[in-house]
Amino acid sequence: MLKLLSFVSSHNFTPLSNFIGGIQFQSAFTPTNHFFHLARVFSSISHSQSKMEADSYMFGPYKIDKKEVFYSTDLSYALVNLRPLLPGHVLVCPRREVKRFGDLSADETSDLWLTAQKVGKQLESYHKASSLTFAIQLDVKEKEMKQSLDLDKERKDRSIEEMAEEADEYRKLF
């Protein structure tokens, strides 16, 4: 499973360069940053609230409650994070699961970046941030990556109500 990871928006940060599955990414870890976590990859740009309500969503083996989804296209969806690092740390996923970035079709790849741009622009404005950083993570190293992102602080799962409330706020941006 391919994931896009760590959309960072901040005023000041010091990047940490890492290599995950051979693909470089930069992330920043300071209390003033807002993370936008992009996971697995995205697609088509026609948002439809009624379509979003009718669809079901999967994240790998996990079924995603539609209340967690705040943006949806024909080929992708954006949802809030179960364990966000900071406010604004969200996931954007493709409808179709792929193992590698190169497995995406041209339309999916285009939509991936257009969706990232659209969601990123809205959340950057919402959180009054000044920059964005995107990265790709492959599952091969996901466990190691997760450990490095924990920052010696155990984060607890949020309730569906808490995530639904955040998704409602973000949904208003679109």
Image: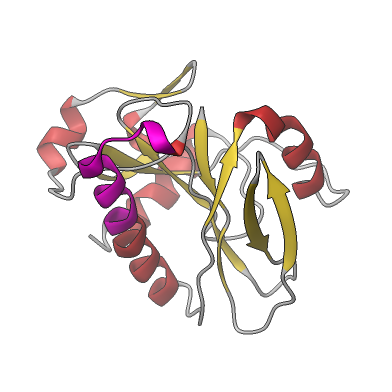
Kindly indicate the quadrant of the structure image that contains residue 77: top left
Quarter of the rendering occupied by the C terminus: bottom left
Q: Position of residue 109 (x, y in %)?
A: 30, 46
In this view of the protein, which residue sits in the foreground, 172 or 18? 18
Q: Is residue 65 left or right of residue 158?
A: left
Q: Position of residue 166 (x, y in %)?
A: 44, 51
Kindly indicate the quadrant of the structure image that contains residue 146: top right
Residue at the image point whose x is 29% and y is 63% from the top: 118
Q: Is residue 48 magenta?
A: no
Residue at the image point whose x is 20% and y is 43% from the top: 107
Image height check: is 27 above or below 160? Answer: below
Single out the residue that lies furthest toward the right: 152
Residue at the image point whose x is 71% and y is 33% from the top: 141
Q: Is residue 58 left or right of residue 76?
A: right
Q: Is residue 73 left or right of residue 2?
A: left
In this view of the protein, which residue sits in the foreground, 155 or 93? 93
Specify the color scheme. secondary structure
Residue at the image point whose x is 27% and y is 63% from the top: 173
State which region is magenta.
Answer: 102-115
Q: Main secondary structure of the magenta part?
A: helix
Image height check: is 129 above or below 22? Answer: below
Q: Position of residue 33 (x, y in %)?
A: 64, 71
Q: Position of residue 84 (x, y in %)?
A: 61, 49
